[in-house]
Amino acid sequence: MSDGPIQEVDDSNLWVQRYQQRRQPELLRQLEEFQLQVQRAPNDAKALRELGWLEYQLGRTPDALDHLAQSVRFDRRDGEASYRLGVVQLGEQHLEDADKSFRQALKLAPQHALALQQLGVTCLRRQRLAEAEEFLSQAAGVNALDAESRVLLARLRSESDLVAAISLLEEAVGIDRYHRGAYDLLRRLYRRTGRIEEAKRATKTVEELALLDDLGVLGHPLQPERFLAEADYYRRHERFERSLEVLHEGIRVHPSEADLHLLEGRIHAHEQRWQDASESLSEALRLAPDSVVPFEELSEWITQSETPSAIPEAWVDRLREAAKRWPELSSRLPIDR
C-alpha cells in the first residue's frame, strides 16, 4: 500500500473533530464536577487524583502535576495516585521524579502491571538497562496482555538472542495487531534470520499502520475516530471500495455511531447508489434524531451530485422538514422544488 505522503490530514480530521466535539463536553463536565468537589473539600485525595487525571487527559499538564502531587501528599497509601503522577512526570521527562513515583506505587501495590511497565520505560530512558529488563519482565509476567513490555524486552534482547526476541514480538502482535513498533522490529529480525516471506508480510502491515499513525489515530485503533479518519482518507483518494471496507469494520465494532453511517452514505451517494445511501442516511437519522449533522451531510450529498434529477424525492422532503426545525438550513437547500 503506498499513496505517498499524507497531505490532507486536516481535511480528514473534520470527521474526527466532529466525533471528538461530542465527547469533549463529557470530559469537561466531569472536570467541573471534580473541581467543585475539591473546592468543597480541598484535602479530598481521591477527588484531587481524579481531577489531576482529567486535566492530564485534557492536556492541562501543569495543573495535573499539581493536583496529583497533592493527592499523593494527602494519601500516601494510594498507589494509583503515585502511578498516575509518575505517568505525567515521565511524559514531561522528569525522569528521577517519575522513577520515585513508580517505585512508591509498587511499594504499595507490587503487582501493579502498568507501574512495573512504566518504571521499566523510565529505567530505559535513564540507561539503566539491567533494571529496565527486570521490571519489563515482571510486567509481562503479571499481565499476559501487555504487548508493550514484550516489544521493549525484544529490543533489549535483539542483539544477544534473536530467537527470544522474535518470540516476544510474535507474542506482542498476537496481543496487539496494531503495534507498529512490534511489526517494524519483527520485519527486520525476520530478514536477519532469512524469513523473507514473513518479513514481506510484516512490512505490508507496517505500511498500513503508518497511515493510521500519519492520520493521528494509531493510538486508539478500535475507536470511531480511527475508522472515520482512515475511511475518509481512502475516500478522498478515490479508493471507495477500501473506504467502505474500513467503515463496515467500524460499524461492526460501533454499530451505534451515526457518523460512520453518514460517511458510508456519502460514498454511496457519490457513486449514485441511492438505495444504499438512503439506508445509510436512515440509520444515521435513527441514531441521531436530534442532530442537524445528518441533514447538513444530506445537503452536501445533493449539492455534489452529478445527476440531481436522480436524487430521491424523499431526500428533498426530509431536508425541507429539517429546515423548519433548524432555520439555518433554509439558505442551504441545494434544490428548489
Image (cartoon, rainbow, N blue to C red):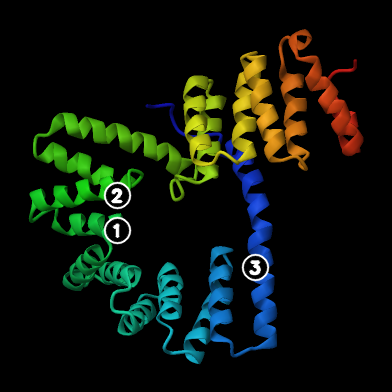
For residue 175, which numbered disc appears in the image? 2
- Depicted 170 relative to depicted 308: above or below: below
**Of pointers 2 and 1, the one earlier in the residue sequence:** 1
- The reply to whether callout 2 and callout 1 are in contact (CB within 8 Å) is yes
Residue annotated with mark 1: 146
Q: Is residue 254 visible?
A: yes
- Depicted 9 relative to depicted 25: above or below: above
Q: Looking at the picture, which amino acid does disc 3 mark? A: Gln
**Of pointers 3 and 1, the one earlier in the residue sequence:** 3
Secondary structure of the residue carrying numbered label 2: helix
The x and y percentages for residue 73 are 48, 90
Q: Looking at the picture, which amino acid does disc 2 mark? A: Ile
- Depicted 159 relative to depicted 120: above or below: above
Q: At 50% across and 46% down in the image, what residue appears?
A: 223
Secondary structure of the residue carrying numbered label 3: helix
Which residue is situated farthest in the front direction here?
286
Quarter of the image for residue 322 reads top right
The x and y percentages for residue 181 are 30, 48
Q: At 44% across and 50% down in the image, what residue appears?
A: 219
- Residue in the foreground of this view, choosing between 159 and 324: 324
Residue annotated with mark 3: 30
- The reply to whether callout 3 and callout 1 are in contact (CB within 8 Å) is no
For the C terminus, the quadrant is top right
- The reply to whether callout 2 and callout 3 are in contact (CB within 8 Å) is no
Neighbourhood count class around disc 3 (C-alpha, 10 Å): few under 14, some 14–19, many 20 upward = some
Quarter of the image for residue 112 reads bottom left
Q: Looking at the picture, which amino acid does disc 1 mark? A: Asp
How far apart marks 2 and 3 lie (CA) works out to 32 Å
Tag count in the figure?
Answer: 3
How far apart marks 2 and 1 lie (CA) works out to 7 Å
